[in-house]
Amino acid sequence: MSRILDRRNALKMGLLATAGVGALSRRAEASTGLQSQNEAVVGRWFTEFWGKTYNPAVVDELAAPDMLLKYSLHKPRHGREDIKAFMHGFRAAFPDLNFWGTAPLLADGDYVIGQWEGSGTHTGPAFSDFLVGSLPANSGRKMHFTGVTILKLKGGKIVQEIGLDDGVTALTQLGLLVKPS
């Protein structure tokens, strides 16, 4: 009798282990699907918001209503309208503004990380959105810098974009910071 119970228990344990592995596999597949969806959203955001050709409608489509946009060069922006106003002013001042990816996006659950490079020439109106100073109209100064951004998504919408950029390089190139002699 004990042999039968042992075999039954062993069989049950094997079935439970197999069921557990199957459940983990299904969760991993679901997570991979979510990560792929999040990467697609961020890829589109990087192209249509930060890329060479700005599409203001992408903010309403992909950003959560209360999205936070935060980089070291600018004050934090909250909400779709504030984010659109920021980009409108940034692109008016730097008409050739363009950012592009320099490595594949990395996704883990609700988070996507992107590495990028960007540049622009200040040929537009005066620009006072930098935290350390303002540019007069049409300074002709160029900036070229790099960074890494972490985006958090919920339900297919971007709720946070927080970037660490080489702002010192950009501000030095624009003449807002001076290298010590």
Image (cartoon, rainbow, N blue to C red):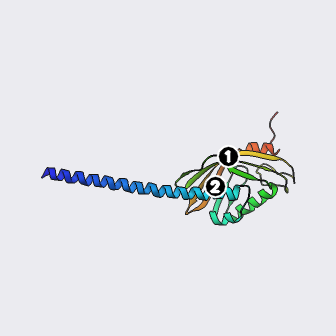
Front in this rendered view, residue 158 or 119 = 119
Residue shown at 85% from the left, 53% from the top:
123
Q: CA distance from mark 1 to mark 2?
A: 12 Å
Q: Say which quarter of the image contains residue 127.
A: bottom right
As shown in the figure, which amino acid type bears the numbered disc 2?
Glu
User: Residue under circle 2?
Assistant: 161
Local secondary structure at mark 1: strand
The image shows residue 176, relative to residue 36, as above or below, that is above
Disc 2 residue crowd, few under 14, some 14–19, many 20+, Cα 10 Å: many
Residue 115's label in the rendered image is: none
Residue at figure coordinates x 58%, y 53% from the top left: 112
Q: Position of residue 2 (x, y in %)?
A: 14, 50
Percent across and percent down for residue 53 are 74, 58
Seen from the viewer's position, the closer of residues 92 and 134 is 92
Label 2 near label 1: C-beta < 8 Å? Answer: no
Left/right placement of residue 72 relative to residue 181 reads: left
Mark 1 or mark 2, earlier in chain: 1
Which one is closest to the eye, mark 1 or mark 2?
1
Using residue 58 as the reference point, say whether residue 120 is left or right of it. right
Residue where numbered disc 1 is placed = 147
Task: Report how many numbered discs are placed on residues in the image.
Answer: 2
- Residue 142 image point, x, y percent: 81, 47
On the image, the x and y values in percent for residue 8 come to 20, 54
- Check disc 1 and give the amino acid type: Gly
- Residue 162 versus residue 78 in the image, above or below: above
Residue placed at 69% from the left, 59% from the top?
A: 48
